[in-house]
Image: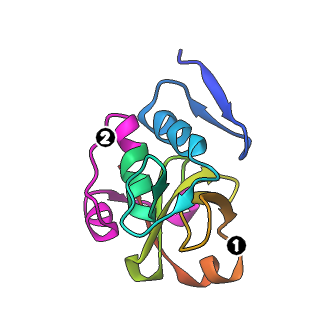
Amino acid sequence: MASTTTAQAANVVVTSGSDAQAALSYAYKQLGKDYCYGGTGPSCFDSAGLTKKAWAAGGVTLPRTTYGQYADTRRVNYSSLRPGDLVFFSGLGHVGIYVGAGKFIHAPSSGKKIQITSMATGYYRREYYGAGRP
């Protein structure tokens, strides 16, 4: 039986050693870093750069763009989201990683830092596009 670990900020349980756990662990370590257009780390990221690098930490190769990431992942219903799933917004203009409890980690936009945000807030609730599982 696999052990489990709790993702601190979201208080969700994910199986240790899983690809999703490695992706989430990487993403949590980026909290507070700057957003930068076209950024793929290590000092700043844009949304797709963050998700690409996070999943690479789990051994999964994703395309560089939100469009490619959406195309290369399996569709997931909102009600079936699991920590690690990619969540897309604004007609594929933005992506983040679902952390559980209705929240996701992402690199929002210029002048902002990588953060955890509720998917129930006005903008993200209105602009939700869909989800994918790498």
Q: Image point 41% across, 82% down: which residue?
A: 91
At label 1, which amino acid type do we have?
Answer: Ala
Q: Which mark is residue 120?
A: 1
Q: Image point 30% across, 66% down: which residue?
A: 65
Residue 93 % position (x, y)? 41, 78
- Residue 55, quarter of picture: top left
Mark closest to the chain's N terminus, 2 or 1: 2
Residue 133 can be seen in this image: no
Mark 1 lies on a secondary structure that is loop
Query: Which of 40 and 67 lies nearest the eye of the viewer?
Result: 40
Q: In the rendered structure, which segment of residues is drawn in magenta?
A: 55-80
Residue 43 % position (x, y)? 48, 50
Query: Which of 111 and 13 lies nearest the eye of the viewer?
Result: 111
- Residue 115, quarter of picture: bottom right
Residue 95 can be seen in this image: yes
Q: Is residue 5 above or below residue 85?
A: above
Q: Which mark is residue 60?
A: 2
Mark 2 lies on a secondary structure that is loop
